[in-house]
Image (cartoon, helix red, strand yellow):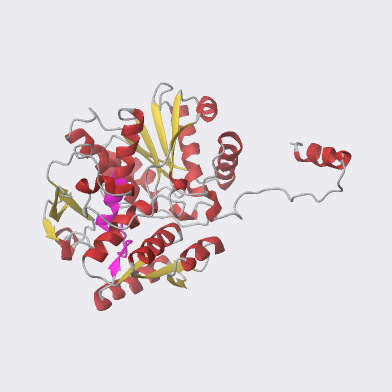
Amino acid sequence: MTTSYTGVLACGRCGVTLEEGEAFGGCPRCAADGVFVNVHPVYRSPDPFGVSGGGPGIFRFGHVLPVPEGVSLGEGGTPLLPLVRTGAELGVAELYLKDETRNPTWSYKDRLAAVAVAKARRSGADTVVVATTGNHGAAAAAYAAASGLRCVALTLAVVPRTMKVLMQVYGARLVALHSGPERWRLMAAGVSERGWVPLSGFRDPPIGSNPFGIDGYKTIAYEIVEDLGGAPDVVVVPTAYGDGLVGILRGFVDLRSARRIRSLPRLVAAEPLGPYAATLAAGSDEPVSVPRRPTVAFSTATPVATRQGLWALRASDGTAVAVGDDTEILRAQRSLAETEGVFLEAAAALAFVAVGRLVGSGWIRSEDRVVVVGTSSGLKDVEAPDLPEVPVIDPSLDALDAALAGSEEP
């Protein structure tokens, strides 16, 4: 399959173009000025719907990705679910969930990993490396295994056991460190001294992940427009370093450039600690740092925004909402499961709290068509929900009635 990818990457801030061998460290010209920003692939007039056929999974869009084909595990093609009852409760007439829990390793990171690993394999690499709290590592390990590559995963000691199991079971060489900066320093050494291909970010301050992989998220935008027959008004994305935000927006930009849609949806970063909200509120070009603290939404718990994420919000006239209350997040998680039959990770469920707040402020109107990207499954952290103990009863209807009555008490 031919591709519209030009073989070079560009910095959106200063415009410098880079060869693929310079892709992973961010823009060197901006770094020399003390500004740290990711670079992204450049395409010639990409039209996502301009070619029929293509490969399996998201590689059916291979002509608008930085690698036209790769090993697919069936990622993509996830359902866009109408949430009628939740929408009515929040005050939104058209509310949808892009259910990314249906991907092979239960998160939207599979889209990034499919493209990034395919690119690494094509370059002749034998090892990929990732700094991760779980979702990114599970996806990287699975696609590396399927592609015959070794995966080294650097995680944190505090991540849930389920996350560690998902990385190890796919064959990742997994070690834990005490802090994010420690992971990044070790990963940078592996990239520079061993020639390992980074699938996540490793710079401090962070700039974002592997730029080839980020474009795997463009396919979320393509599928949303396919299913809706047009662009939504608002897309809400649980956000850490902004990979999903920028990839999804780049997909909508492709569609607008190809005249498949007229305008871009407004993007929302839903976050637990609030660096994007703080930066936007300050009107700052420099990402603002906020205090780090524990949260059930640990997968998105970054205390600093990235320039790529801020660009996506500003370019789409978007906004950010900080949801710091664990009780509120877990309530939304359980409500969605009990009302709509979808169990999201806490880091994804907080997006629905963000929707409610934006409806309350008038930023989201009742007539807006709103899509929430459900980035990961709640099965990644089964200890998070505060659920009652399961009663053990005698085999009689009276005992069953008593247990059921007890379970229905407020």
Residue 293, percent from left and from top: 50, 57
Whether 177 is drawn above or below 364: the answer is: below
Q: In this view, does 369 lie to the left or right of 213?
A: right
Q: In which quarter of the image is the C terminus?
A: top right
Task: Look at the image and tell me whether residue 240 can be seen.
Answer: no
Residue at 40% of width from left, 30% of height from top?
370
**Which contiguous range is marked in magenta?**
197-218
Residue drawn at x 47%, y 49% is: 376
Q: Residue at x 40, y 69 (%)?
A: 153
Q: Which of the pair 121/325 is nearer the observer?
A: 121
Q: Is 348 in the magenta?
A: no
Q: Is residue 43 above or below residue 178?
A: above
Asked if residue 215 lies in the magenta stretch, the reply is: yes
Residue 332 pos. (x, y %):
56, 39
Q: Which of 245 and 120 is in front in this view?
A: 120
Question: Residue at the spot x=33%, y=56% of the render?
Answer: 114
Image location of residue 165, percent across then percent down: 52, 65
